[in-house]
Image (cartoon, grey):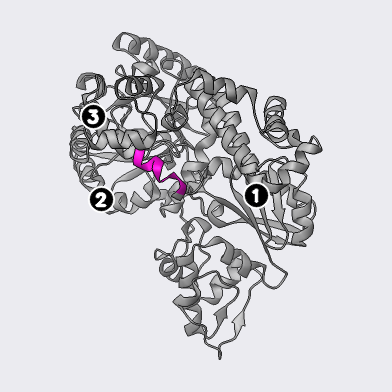
Amino acid sequence: MQDPRQISLELDEIATLLEFSGASRFRVNAFRRGAQIVNTLGDELGALVEQGRLEEFEGIGATLSRQIEELWNTGTSELLAQLRREQPEGVVELVQVEGLTPRRIRALTGALGIRSVEELREACLTGRIAKVPGFGPKTQERLLAAAERWLRRGEEAPEPLILAAALRLAELIRSRLLRVVERAELAGAVRRGEELVHELEFVIAGDPERALSHLTGLRQVLRVDIVAHMAWLTDGVTLRLHVGGPDDFGSVLVDATGNSAHLLALRERARPRGFELAPSRAPAAAIEPEPTLPRRTFATETELYAALDCSLVPPELRQGTGELDQAASGDFSDLLELGDIMGMVHCHTVYSDGKNSVLEMAQGAHALGMKYITITDHSPSAHYARGVTLDRLREQWDEIAAVQEQVPIRILRGTESDILSDGHLDFPDAILERFDVVIASIHARHRMDRDAMTKRIEHALSLPIYKIWGHALGRILNHRPPFDCDVPRVLDALAKAGGAVEINADPHRLDLPPAWIPAVRERGLSLVVSVDAHSVRGLDVLGYGVTMARRGGVRKSEVLNARDAQSFATAVRPVS
């Protein structure tokens, strides 16, 4: 009998060595996923191997199943042994350090004999990395930070799911639950619309034991804990069920949805009204219950908030940031909704890195009920995205004019113009002024220091044309953090020169983060909820951007593309 944890580590090592040897990303990710699944299965792995059932799980195919069986039955893997023979010692560790490419690893092992991350860290601290040709002080500084992050990796939580993936998984789980329970409502961080989640939560009306037993038939479910009402899934997230009955379903749903700050605010509001809320996940030590006050439960969420003299607070706003004060003085009927959006903004075509033509994108937007679309392909300096050069711009404009005759939807010609390292936009002013809409974005040199990055963006957004600040902080969820800049200072520049801020609906971006929306509002800046679509299919992401806007409390009146085509076009025109 083998140790499942050891098998998980060996699968991860195979993935790492395959990555170093240049194997396809698909193959590398398959082994990484297999390592995660094996680790989650734990002691249940042996029975599954013996019964030949590994391929029942999503993410385990025939090749991966054979590797796991070989490791379980023999304690070795010929593939792993071969990869170890072919690659330099220490690669398994070093390749996991951000910024260490195979070329750099070979350079460091050849020049300094580095064989581990600890040795890399020491070489950085002593300044030896900077002396290796092709590196330098800044690279050394970044590698030191990356090495220290790797050495602390055991302290970090597993990588969360992005919201879009979590919602897809939640829909699958919910449809399965509804086969055996009367009701199943999404709750927790996913219902609040948080960008990254570690756990799916549902409130069910029914038998949780039967519900969890029924879920074991899904390939995505690795194991369940009936007593704890939990399951562990192949995507590295947990599933938690809460149970509500006819008289308290609303109470349980509110409790399972709001964050701890929101729940505490609810409890504090209930007490002066002569009752305690039950149940509650709010920190018990934060407010001790009065034994003389009765505990009340509610069948619906609306009834609970009404008992607190509040209108129903939308799930996205249940964050403990003053939403109950708003609910006590009014309602949220003007909070942005998906149906309020009238135009698709930030769309790419085959003129840059898009997959569909101008006509196909316009038809796709029209099919979704839109009244207008902006064609905003990349600008010349975006060589990686086949940016539109000046000599091709006229060709694109002619095509837009021709397509406009074929579709009822209005087409606005625009650009996503790169903010260059010196803060300039990479179309001449005379050309920028002729677009219908300009989106100004950063696509390169994300690692500039705070002061340099701030000056770069500030200069671009200070230009005397109206522009939309695109995917403002450049983040890619689970891959690239937001770049460092003085956001208030940049927003001040944009407000002075004239412009709007994009809420990018790409599920991997969701940028500008909702936490910055109050700062946008304070400066009187408008917002645009964009799709950043590179295909007709990419238009479908709009709802994720609306969710981010709702988390920031954005009202319909604050969103430019909630206006009709003429009003939007007038608002975003580069030159008045």
Q: Are marks 1 and 2 in contact (CB under 8 Å)?
A: no
Q: Amino acid at mark 2?
A: Arg
Closer to us: mark 1 or mark 3? 3
User: What secondary structure is marked by label 2?
Assistant: loop
Q: Which quarter of the image is occupied by the N terminus?
A: top right
Q: Which residues are magenta?
A: 147-154
Q: Magenta region's main secondary structure?
A: helix
Q: x%, y% of residue 469?
A: 31, 36
For disc 2, the marked residue is 523
As shown in the figure, which amino acid type bears the numbered disc 1?
Answer: Trp
Q: Earlier in the sequence, mark 2 or mark 3?
A: 3
The residue drawn where x is 69% and y is 45% is: 222
Q: Residue at x 51, y 25 (%)?
A: 17
Whether the residues at callouts 2 and 3 have beta carbons within 8 Å, the answer is no
Task: Indicate which label's residue lies in the foreground, 1 or 2.
Answer: 1
**Is residue 221 shown left or right of residue 565?**
right
Q: Which residue is mark 1?
A: 232
- The percent coordinates of residue 237 (x first, y second) are 59, 48
Considering every residue shown, the one lying at the far right of the view is 51
Residue 500 is situated, as x and y percent measured from the top left of the image, at: 31, 40
Toward which corner of the image does residue 57 lie, by quadrant? top right
Residue lying at 51% horizontally and 50% vertically, measured from the top left: 193
The residue indicated by pointer 3 is 128
Specify the quadrant that holds the C terminus: top left
- 147 left or right of 505 in image: left
